Amino acid sequence: MSLAPPPNSALPSQTPPVQKHPRVLAYLLFTETWERFSFYGMRALLVFYLTKAFLFSDRAAYAIYGSYAALVYATPVLGGLLADRLLGFRKAVLIGGVLMALGHFAMAVPNLQVFYAALALLICGNGFFKPNISSLVGRLYVADDPRRDAAFTIFYMGINLGGFLAPIACGYLGERLGWHWGFGLAGIGMLLGLFVFLRAQPLLAGLAEPPVRADGRRVLLGLSLDIWVYLGTALSVVVAWQLVQRAALVGSILIVFGVAVFLGLCVYLLRLSDSIARGRLGVALLLTAFSVVFWSFFEQSGTSMSLFTDRNVDRSLFGKSIAASQFQSVDSLFILLLAPVFSWLWLYLSRRRLEPNTPLKFALGTVQLGLGFVALYIGAAVSRATGVVPMFWLVLCYFLHATGELCLSPIGLSMITKLAPKGMTGILMGTWFLVYSFAQYVAALIAQLTGVKAGGEVATALPKPAETVMIYGSVFGTLGSVALGVGVLLVLASPVLARRMHGVH
């Protein structure tokens, strides 16, 4: 789960530093916690809902999931732009929260077109909400305030707290009592987040208000700019409603847009006269490209790993069966437990001049990701006879993936801010999230290789576990091998890349 750093603070630089964090930070933290609760609660149920309620084949379910996830991580670029230029953070967060709450509650309606419309509401709502709540946290501190990093560490913990609780609660209700209960609880979580945010308004001291335009105009063709944004949002929901049903089109759009952005950045790189800036930007672009491998493999947790857990993992614990969707909380639990450990570890190694450089951290993260899939392969291979894999192997995989995430996700965001040339940080950060969006689409294509419920849109009967375990296992083994190979390649290249960073560690 990643968190983008915000733009420079809007507070005046002469604000005297204080030891305690602003009181409003707690409100923003719990707003984000409840929003993430709603997001990950719905995500935990999505593939199961498609395959069990609508009886989609695995391939069809993965395609819809991939379209949704790709668009969810693409829209924050536009949502952040609209907040910066027109709406301000308060309106953007409120619009996003309302759209997402409507989307969650619409998910409870057992109608396929309503379901697609619900996904469209969630996609557009996330675009307004995700980039702007974190930007508000940054507005609480001046650029060089030493409390800033600590504040975002706390905020990151809030994200993972929501990600930990949601699959447990929503997954249990959705799979045990009925899908509408799980989706309804996710909607209630979003409403709680909105309530907390509204309570925070008096404490924001104008930091979330719309920017003042240089020309002072707020009207276009007789309508206020806000009204134009609302009309555009309504149109975007309709467009997203159609796109989420057309995975191939979404992929084509991402490829065309991604290639255009990459070529533009390459042209900018070649035209840079400063050799140091050119070297740093080259490393940033290369590592960003490599991150596609990590995220497209890592995001199997919401698709192939979820159905593997449901169909081929022994989920019994102390005589009771755990719902498959609840296992998606394991990664967030490990993040909550290990994030302070990794934070301490990097500082400890830094004081002794032993801290790995950024490319080597990327390599370590990718290697650990690969080892996680190797664990799943071993678990599947030793369980060929029965097709039922002991829970230990799944938990070990999630542990290794969490340690890999901690080596790469926060490091990648920090890398962008350190290596970007002056005036390019926002563009590179947008590129990072565009790559993440594309990785979601690639993840769905990879997941389709594990499809064991055949057919077109509607699935056929499910084979026995012994017949499916190595379908999953062989794909997981291939992912593990590729990830380990990429990780070793990065280890070998890290000294060269580190030199190209010119003193930035």
Image: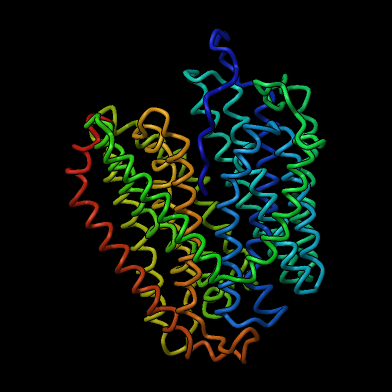
Question: 357 left or right of 5?
Answer: left
Image x and y of residue 171, in percent: 68, 64
* Residue found 61% across the figure and 46% down from its top: 161
Q: How many marks?
A: 0
Q: Position of residue 188 (x, y in %)?
A: 80, 52
Query: Considering only vertical position in the picture, is 317 above or below 168?
Result: below
Q: Residue at x 60, y 39 (%)?
A: 80
Q: Which residue lies at the image location 72% right of the left edge and 45% below the top edge?
A: 96
In the image, taking residue 107 as reference, residue 489 lies left or right, namely left
Q: Is residue 37 left or right of residue 271?
A: right
Residue 227: image quadrant is: top right
Single out the residue that lies furthest toward the front: 221
Coloration of the structure image = rainbow
Q: Is residue 135 left or right of residue 200?
A: left
In depth, the one of 369 and 485 nearer the eye is: 485
Q: Nearer the viewer, residue 9 or 17?
A: 9
Report the quarter where the C terminus lies. top left
Q: Where 113 falls versus 485 (above or below)?
A: below
Which quadrant of the structure image shows residue 399?
Answer: bottom left
Rendered location of residue 411, percent (x, y): 39, 41
x then y, percent, for residue 436 = 47, 53
Q: Name the residue: 76% across, 58% down.
A: 104
From the viewer's side, name the closer residue of 377 and 233: 233
Look at the picture and state if 104 lies above or below 135: below
Vertical arrangement, residue 363 with respect to residue 118, above or below: above
